[in-house]
Amino acid sequence: MSAEIATRKELDAEKAISSFIPYTRHVTDTILGTAAGDLLTVFKLSGRSHLSADYETLMNWVRDLNTVFKGAASDHLALWTHMVRRRVTEYPQAHYDNTFCAQFDMKYRAMFTEKSLMVNELYLTVIHRAMPDKTLALLAKFEKQSTREKVERQQSAVKDLEELQRLFFSSLKRYGPEVLSTYKCVHALTDVTADDGTVHQEEQRIELADWWERERPRFPRKPDDGRSELEFAEAAAAADNLPVYLYSRPAEFLARLVNGEQLPMPVTFAHFRETMPQNRINFSSWGELGEIRTPTRTRFFGMVEVFDYEKRTEPGHLNTFLKAPYECVLTQSFSLLSRHAARGQLERH
């Protein structure tokens, strides 16, 4: 009995992972909120081919980006970039009647299992901070606001962030930007063949757009139907008694940073901070080594912090990570200061 009490006390004393995660819920389809009142939106970038560009071209790209950031300058703005380097294991199923195509597909598929193929994914997170000044943020905790005032403040912040979305989307067009948003999935039973040849049914998650592409011929549409394509597709899924659930791509990206692997993130009534942590993360006493425990395996990771930069930085300083033989996440952040905070920073240094 005493052992059970000691175990219970130990569990109660342990701090939940959710206390370190700020994300709450979707404010719009593309904007997430945080517990501190900040708002954020996530861009996925295809990137540009830097290997075929000369030095002067690279510097021009940097100057163009600097101009974009200057145009968006505000003490409410903070930027986070993530380069997620991961192994590629997924390969689309295909059937070819042509013998040459079938053999080529078989050998190309083997590359995904015999070799460690890696892909670099680029993300830009744009954050609108509710209280960028620490002093004002402290005073705001003692200020009592009505529900109406809170709603008006949030609506104003959403409007500002949507303007930033449009600015960055148009300014970064050469980098292939995609604003991560919510999406819907159909949960359908499909036949799965086991290793021993037996066939059984499993529930699979299929994006509504992909399901509709396959099932559209079964549901003729009247010319005067005013519903959108996806609204009609959702009604068709309901007619087939298939449940449709809402998922979040920006939350899935953030969940990957938390859990170390790609996981689906449904939109629920609970906060994302409660549903996002699905793996157990342990850190060493020194903090630079950690362990990720999943239901099926254990992985270890290390962390390196680049605190001081050189006086002059040039494109290519971190290109080594683009060719690393291991999975990694490269994170960089940049927060703009108010005039008052910037003046104080200059005076102290």
Image: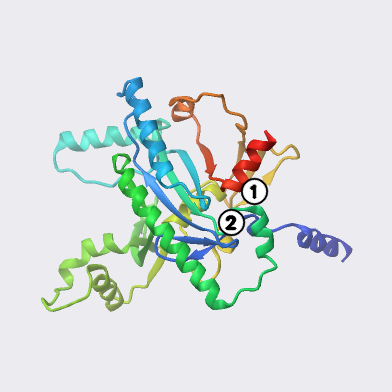
Please state the horizontal and vertical placement of residue 95, each as a whole percent of the image.
21, 46
As drawn, the residue found furthest toward the top would be 55
Q: Is residue 331 visible?
A: yes
Foreground of the two, 51 or 240: 51
Quick check: 90 left or right of 149?
A: left
**In the rendered image, the vertical position of residue 140 relative to residue 62, given as above or below:** below
Using the rendered view, name the quadrant where residue 278 is placed: bottom right
Mark yes or no: residue 180 visible: no
Residue 260 drawn at (x, y percent): 54, 46
For residue 218, side relative to residue 327 (left or right): left
Q: Quadrant of the C terminus?
A: top right
**Residue found 35% across the figure and 58% down from its top:** 192
SS under mark 2 = loop
Q: Which mark is residue 106?
A: none
Residue drawn at 46 percent across, 49 percent down: 125
Task: Verify CB contact (< 8 Å) between mark 2 and mark 1.
Answer: yes
Looking at the image, is 156 positioned above or below residue 301?
below
Compared to 115, does 262 lie above or below? below
Q: Which amino acid is tagged 1?
A: Ile
| Quadrant for the N terminus in the image | bottom right
Where residue 281 is drawn, which disc sits there?
Answer: 1
Tell me the amino acid under the disc marked 2: Pro
Q: Residues within 10 Å of mark 1 (few under 14, many from 20)?
A: some
Residue 348, position as x, y percentages in the image: 69, 36
Circle 2 sits on which residue?
277
10 Å neighbourhood of mark 2: few (<14), some, or many (≥20)?
some
